[in-house]
Amino acid sequence: MGRTVVTILLMTLTVFASDMNVYERNCVECHKKLPVSLDKFFFNYLLKYSSERRVKQALRNYLKHPRKKASLATEELVARYGLMPKTTLSDKELKEAIDIYWEKYKVFGKIE
Ligand code: HEC
């Protein structure tokens, strides 16, 4: 009984403590260990897929099924860090994370 209360308290605290969104919590947390920044990856996707719809679709596919063949990362990076692990986010969270990622960097698309 006491333990349940403590668990619930801890969970509530965690929720309050993290005003980080799903993108920061998931994508940024792991990516900050990598030498290639998320903005560089975004730029590659934008160059290759150009429209919002196609970029988001390609990102969703890659995050759900990372494959060497589909990867835009360099051989060296993949050899050193491996492919990105398949996402553990739900479809809803993944969509949210990709939307935030897009909103954050889409300004690159205006450098024409
Ligand atoms: C547990 C670690 C981890 C998490 C979580 C993670 N990534 Fe990655 N990501 C990697 C690694 C390692 C690579 C480089 C290898 C590769 O490209 O698969 C990568 C590559 C990428 C690439 C380039 C893909 C390509 O074409 O090769 C994009 C874009 C990307 N991540 C976006 C995201 C976004 C958006 C999220 C959050 C929804 C996310 N990542 C979550 C580790 C992670």
Image (tube, rainbow, N blue to C red):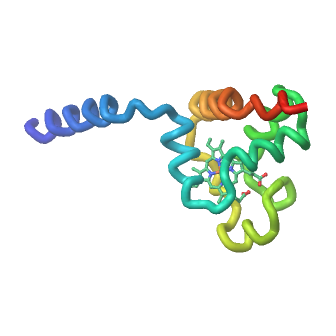
Query: Looking at the image, is 84 positioned above or below residue 59?
Result: below
Q: Nearer the viewer, residue 33 or 82?
A: 33
Left or right of 111 in this view: 40 = left
Quadrant (top left, top right, bottom left, bottom right) of the C terminus: top right
Q: 9 left or right of 18?
A: left
- Quarter of the picture containing the N terminus is top left
Residue 86 lies, in percent from the top left, at: 65, 52
Please state the horizontal and vertical placement of residue 43, each as a whole percent of the image: 80, 43
What's the residue at 88%, 28% (across, down)? 51
| Picture quadrant where residue 107 is located | top right
Against 83, residue 6 (above or below) is above
Count of marks placed on residues: 0
Identity of the residue furthest to the front in this view: 111
Q: Nearer the viewer, residue 99 or 44?
A: 44
Q: Is residue 88 left or right of residue 17?
A: right
Q: Residue 11 falls in which quadrant of the image?
A: top left
Name, please, the residue furthest toward the left.
Answer: 2
Q: Residue at x 59, y 53 (%)?
A: 31
Q: Position of residue 63 (x, y in %)?
A: 70, 45
x and y, in percent, of residue 19 in the image: 40, 30
- Please say if 21 is above or below 25: above
Residue 81 position by quadrant:
bottom right
- The residue sitting at 53% across, 44% down in the picture is 26
